[in-house]
Amino acid sequence: MIKKRKANRYTEVYALGQHICMSAHKARRVIDQIRGRSYEETLMILELMPYRACYAILKLVYSAAANATHNKGFNKTSLIISKAEVNEGTTVKKLKPRARGRSYPIKRSTCHITIVLKDISLDEEEEIDKTKSYKLELRNI
């Protein structure tokens, strides 16, 4: 089933990282800290946190911001992280050779990380336009 986005896609830009060699649980620990924050605040948080997941997430946030400025022409100061999610990916299964011809399985879990940035300046302009049109309608009535 294909999910369709109902949100305004003209104000949203996303970056998707797939098959990142990291547990989804460990990545969610970092993602929960940055969800809903501004772009600049997110960069400060990610650079100061001591987790390995921060580097991969920082690269995705940079990539989403570059997509926003290059493709849509958004200003980086007016971007917020509207949606950040981590999904489990495939598990890479290997065998570690042990003594007497035996082997032990090694499971390397991967995850998919999605970062969605939203431009709040465009939303504010739309709200102002809606209130102006509503006030004009009230005057005409």
Image (cartoon, grey):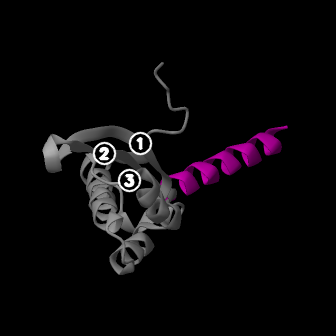
Q: Residue furthest top?
A: 1
Range covered by the magenta-colored residues: 121-141
Any part of residue 17 in sight = no
**Disc on the earlier residue, 3 or 2:** 3
- Confirm whether the magenta stretch covers residue 127: yes
- What's under tag 3, amino acid-wise? Ser
Write the residue at 41% across / 58% down: 27
Place of residue 10 in the rendered image (x, y in percent of width and height, measured from the top left): 43, 41
Q: Main secondary structure of the magenta part?
A: helix
Q: Residue furthest right?
A: 141
Write the residue at 32% across / 46% down: 110
**Disc on the earlier residue, 2 or 1:** 1
Q: Is residue 138 above or below residue 57?
A: above
What element does badge 1 sit on?
strand
Quarter that holds the C terminus: top right
Circle 3 residue: 23
Write the residue at 51% across / 67% down: 33
**Left or right, 95 with reference to 135:** left
What element does badge 3 sit on?
loop
Structural crowding at the residue carrying mark 3, measured as other residues with C-alpha within 10 Å and reported as few (<14), some (14–19) or many (≥20): some
Structural crowding at the residue carrying mark 1, measured as other residues with C-alpha within 10 Å and reported as few (<14), some (14–19) or many (≥20): some
**Left or right, 103 with reference to 35:** left
**Left or right, 19 with reference to 7:** left
Q: Nearer the viewer, residue 24 or 14?
A: 24
Circle 2 residue: 107
State if disc 1 and disc 3 touch (CB < 8 Å). no
**Left or right, 118 with reference to 125:** left
Cα separation, mark 2 vs mark 1, equals 13 Å
- What's under tag 1, amino acid-wise? Glu
